[in-house]
Amino acid sequence: MTSQVTQSAAREPAGRPGGAEHTRSVPVFAPATDIYETKAGLVLVAEIPGADPDSIEVTFDRNVLRLTARSKMAAPAGHSLIHAEYRDGDYERSFVLPVEIDAERIEATVKDGLLRLVLPRSEPAPAKKIAVKAG
């Protein structure tokens, strides 16, 4: 079973959905992301190195999943940075998901610069008998 996930701002620069201006003077990165489909739903893994876990925001509205985070690189205590390949900045990425997701059961974890989201499918609504009133 293969589904296609659509980026909501494929032709626009990261951080400027709908042409909105970015108000912070830091670069905005579109994190590299893999999305896998399973029988239970979708699994998304995004690279957000240096992101402060407290800055990570994941929103899901009308089948649009939006990820944002801020990174601030710092050397471990007692060490000084002599070479860096990552820069401070913001991460922003949005996806239009092709399947119905149960927003109440979404799970998000971050470890070693990887954000992992488990997006379970919505359960189909059970059949319901509708009472018909005369009148």
Image (cartoon, rainbow, N blue to C red):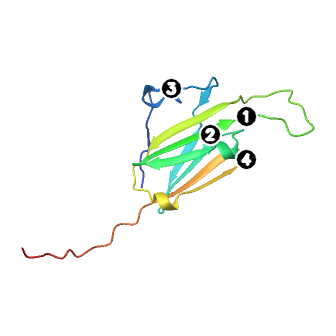
Looking at marks 3 and 2 on the same chain, the residue that comes earlier in the sequence is marked by 3
Mark drawn on residue 13: 3
* Residue 69, numbered label: 2
Amino acid on which disc 3 is placed: Pro
Percent from the top left, x then y, of residue 80? Answer: 89, 31
Q: Is tag 1's residue or tag 3's residue first in the polypeptide sequence?
A: 3
Q: Are marks 4 and 3 in contact (CB under 8 Å)?
A: no
Residue at 70%, 30% in the rendered image = 88
Q: Which residue is mark 4?
A: 112
Say which amino acid is labelled 4: Asp
Q: Are marks 2 and 4 in contact (CB under 8 Å)?
A: no
Between marks 4 and 3, how big is the CA–CA gap? Answer: 26 Å
Q: Residues within 10 Å of mark 2 (few under 14, many from 20)?
A: many
State the CA–CA distance, disc 1 to disc 2.
Answer: 10 Å
Q: Quadrant of residue 124?
A: bottom left
| Residue 66 image offset from top left, x and y in percent | 51, 43
- The numbered dot on residue 72 is 1
Whichever of labels 4 and 1 marks the residue nearer the N terminus, that label is 1
